[in-house]
Image (tube, rainbow, N blue to C red):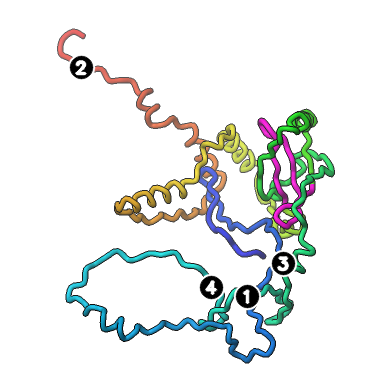
Amino acid sequence: MASTVWRGYISFGLISVPVRLYRAARAERVSFRRLYRQAPGDDNEPEAVTKITPSPPSRRAAEASPPPAMEPRRAEPALAPIQQAAVLKGTDEVVPAASVVKGYEYDKDRFVVIEPEELKSIAPKTSAAMEIEEFVPLVEIDPVYFETSYYATPEEAGEKAYALLYRAMQNTGLVALARFAMHSREHIVVLRPGRTGLLAHTMFYASEVRADEEYRADPSVVTAKELDLAQTLIHSLAGSFDPARYRDSYRERLESMLERKVKGQPVNIAPTPLRHGEVVDIADALRRSLADLKKPPATEKAAQKPARTKRTHGKS
């Protein structure tokens, strides 16, 4: 079983379903390790390795430096970018880039070196052709196979042929499956007509989709009454898809926080409340959820409530 990437609850009306998320698909790569390769004839400690040791200050610099003040002035800490260095595992010895090679661990702590020329000889070259192999109905492709989405735009010389392919796929209701190479990797891609042009979706291979790890639900435990209530609730919440309704709220909060920090303004840190699921009777929770949907909002209630007439003495 793959590792859990998220754990929480799916809220469905007043029902909370505790769930875990696992990756359904992952691009498979042969992993390599960065290794230090000693030159022939080197001893256990190679000369090329540089030890990280702080250099002591010179005598002249020590004499020239002023004595520390009794009340040092507080200043902002100096910040500067850093870069990574290759260090021998378990030591503080920096290895020069020329001595770092790429290797494959075929057994515990046993490696074979892969030379750059060897990888280049078998790597697929980025192809200039995306050859369509077949057309299939889009509904037959499970979205779990989709990896990355792209817009496909034509060059000036191919606008008519582009429009022809776009219109033909619109009329037939079929999408194209093609094969091509990009970024030293072979891809299967789905070409489909969008609202105004063609879109391309690279796909995971069948070997990358963990179909055997999909959970198998048991519908026999659900009663007919519960199913009817759940379907009624689903229809009550149904609507048209509007992607503008869904925004990356974390990025918006992060950008706002960064803007405040750049301006030197304080940042308030508020704890995020955790929501816990509650074990309830499913049928009762569905009925209450439907009842809540039928209740008018508070403002609507106020508008519907008749205004009271002010009583006065004498004739009305």
Residue placed under numbered mark 1 in the picture:
98
Which of labels 1 and 3 is toward the front? 1
> Residue at (78%, 28%) from the top-left corner?
171
Three-letter code, disc 1: Ala
Which of labels 4 and 2 is toward the front? 4
**Residue farthest to the bottom?**
43
Which of labels 2 and 1 is toward the front? 1
**Residue farthest to the front?**
60
Three-letter code, disc 4: Ala
On residue 311, the disc is 2
Q: Which residues are drawn in magenta?
A: 179-203
Three-letter code, disc 2: Arg
**Separation of marks 1 and 3 at Cα, in angstroms:** 23 Å
**Residue farthest to the left?**
313
In the rendered image, residue 13 lying in the magenta stretch gets the answer no
Dividing the picture into quadrants, the one containing residue 224 is top right
Dividing the picture into quadrants, the one containing residue 61 is bottom left
Circle 3 — which element? loop
Placement of the C terminus among the 4 image quadrants: top left
On residue 30, the disc is 3
Which mark is first along the chain, 4 or 1?
A: 4
Three-letter code, disc 3: Val
Residue 217: image location, x then y, percent: 68, 53
On residue 85, the disc is 4
